[in-house]
Amino acid sequence: MPISIDRHEVQRLVEQGSAQLVEVLPPAEFEEAHLPGAINISLKELNRESTGVLNKDAPVIVY
Amino acid sequence: MSPRAAWRLETLGFTRVYDYVAGKTDWSAAGLPLEGSTASISKAADAIRGSDVTCSLDETLEVVQARVESAGTSACIVTTDDGIVLGRIRGRALQGDPDTTAEQAMSAGPSTIRPDTELAEVVEYYGEAGIKSVLVSDQDGRLIGTVYIEDARKILNSS
């Protein structure tokens, strides 16, 4: 089950070095502003192929 | 969107999925950095002076006066132990009876802005009203600092 976290947890996971940040909003919103280091896979495009770039063994933080 | 995305990732075999439900609005409102085409727009966070004098409700004006004088500032922000803004003491109120408590002397509930407020809007709104400074807090009401309109104008003029 996904774990809901706050921004302090996001910072902690990112500082640990292995967290993968994924913004799931549309590309235009990602382009305007996104968390540092985040990649964009919009909800509509979230599938086996598009998530192939992610490491399944590392934490993934979606927002 | 993110809860559905989080669950979808689990169906795709991801086992360490976290959902930052509050999202980048929360991140930005806390003054944390963002990347992207709007990241270069000057925000309140860019003009914050972090040298505020603070005090608690039960401290006396004698203590507050000494603290303000020592810091060379002109106001004291009254906060909880966690830094939540409750009030502000400045001007004539700072010169009151030394035995008065901060709670008695303060103006309660001063206006605050978020760190991601565009600086141009801050200057337009507060500067036009002749206000010299405005407090910046996060969305929980926790004090981050003060933006002085003169500082904001300098930043905007140099960018």
Image (cartoon, rainbow, N blue to C red):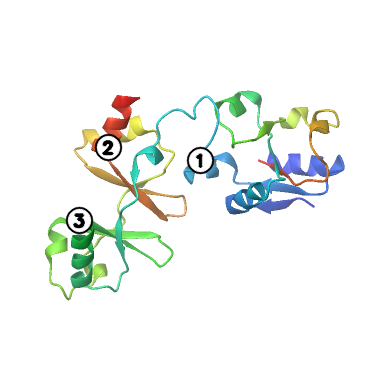
Secondary structure state at the residue bearing disc 1:
helix
Q: Chain of mark 1?
A: B
* Mark-to-mark CA distance, 3 and 1: 31 Å
Q: Is residue B107 above or below residue B159?
A: below
Question: Residue furthest toward the bottom?
Answer: B99
- Whether the residues at callouts 3 and 1 have beta carbons within 8 Å, the answer is no
Q: Residue at x 79, y 44 (%)?
A: B7
The image quadrant of residue B120 is top left
Q: Is residue A60 visible?
A: yes
Q: Is residue A12 above or below residue B63?
A: above
Marks 2 and 3: which is nearer the front?
3
Label 3 is placed on what type of residue? Answer: Gly
Q: Residue at x 80, y 52 (%)?
A: A1
Q: Residue at x 23, y 58 (%)?
A: B71
- Residue placed under numbered mark 3 in the picture: B72
Secondary structure state at the residue bearing disc 3:
loop
Q: Residue at x 86, y 39 (%)?
A: B12
Disc 2 packing (10 Å; few <14; some 14–19; many ≥20):
some
